[in-house]
Amino acid sequence: MSTVRAAVLPAVGAPLEITDIRVPEPGPGRVRVRLAAAGVCHSDLSLSNGTLRQPVPAVLGHEGSGTVVAVGEGVETVAPGERVVLNWAPACGACHHCAELAEPWLCLHAGAATTVPYAESARGAQLYPGLSVAAFAEETVVPANAVLPLPDGVPLVDAALLGCAVLTGHGAVNHAARVRKGESVAVFGL
């Protein structure tokens, strides 16, 4: 285990606490990432105030990018030293929505890591990863399917927003609203 700094939500409705936590080496099928950047999303507020359910204590933050520090047994998709963006809702590829309906955005298991402790506080309390990622920390450990290699030339700071904000906006325009070339739209709020 390594000690890193993190912003921990000790209880729903409580302020975040900047403190040391212990992050384990990655087990089978898991990846340890040193964060370079993390975005702040309204979903983090919704987790902290109880609008969205999240086991606590938790390390929030689900938009993140960084560099792979270590990989667990069986991980072949990334290697130490690679730059990655984190995916807070990775599709399992095997459930009904993923395999049979080809709708991975509705994956039944995408949020499974949210309910599994991934680290511990300095006092030994189990910590949960906010929306499966825990990007408000210097390092995190996530399932291998939650890391995506970045192409050369994509700055890590900018890449963090690919984890939620950019894809959410793209999905809203292209899938929910189904805006097509030549149509006009108005966006209220950012």
Image (spheres, rainbow, N blue to C red):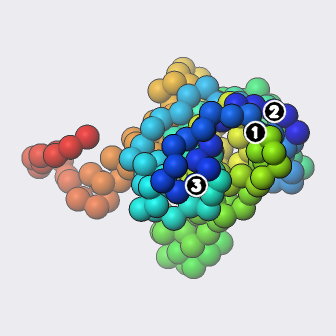
Taking the image as shown, residue 73 lies to the left or right of residue 115, namely right
Residue drawn at point x = 35 percent, y = 53 percent: 171
Inter-mark Cα distance, 1 to 3? 16 Å
Residue tagged 3: 11
Which x, y percent locates residue 13?
Answer: 48, 53
Residue drawn at point x = 76 percent, y = 55 percent: 126
Q: 10 Å neighbourhood of mark 2: few (<14), some, or many (≥20)?
A: some
Asked if residue 96 shows in the view, the reply is yes
- Nearer to us: label 1 or label 3: 3
How many numbered callouts?
3
Decide which of tag 1 and tag 2 comes sooner along the chain.
2
Which x, y percent locates residue 7?
Answer: 61, 37
Residue tagged 1: 21
Decide which of tag 1 and tag 3 comes sooner along the chain.
3
The three-letter amino acid code for the residue at tag 1 is Ile
Residue nearest the observer in this picture, 138 or 19 = 19
- Determine whether the residue tagged by mark 3 lies in a helix, strand or loop: loop
Q: Quadrant of residue 150?
A: top right
Taking the image as shown, residue 48 lies to the left or right of residue 70, namely left
The three-letter amino acid code for the residue at tag 3 is Ala
Taking the image as shown, residue 83 lies to the left or right of residue 184, namely right
Residue tagged 2: 3
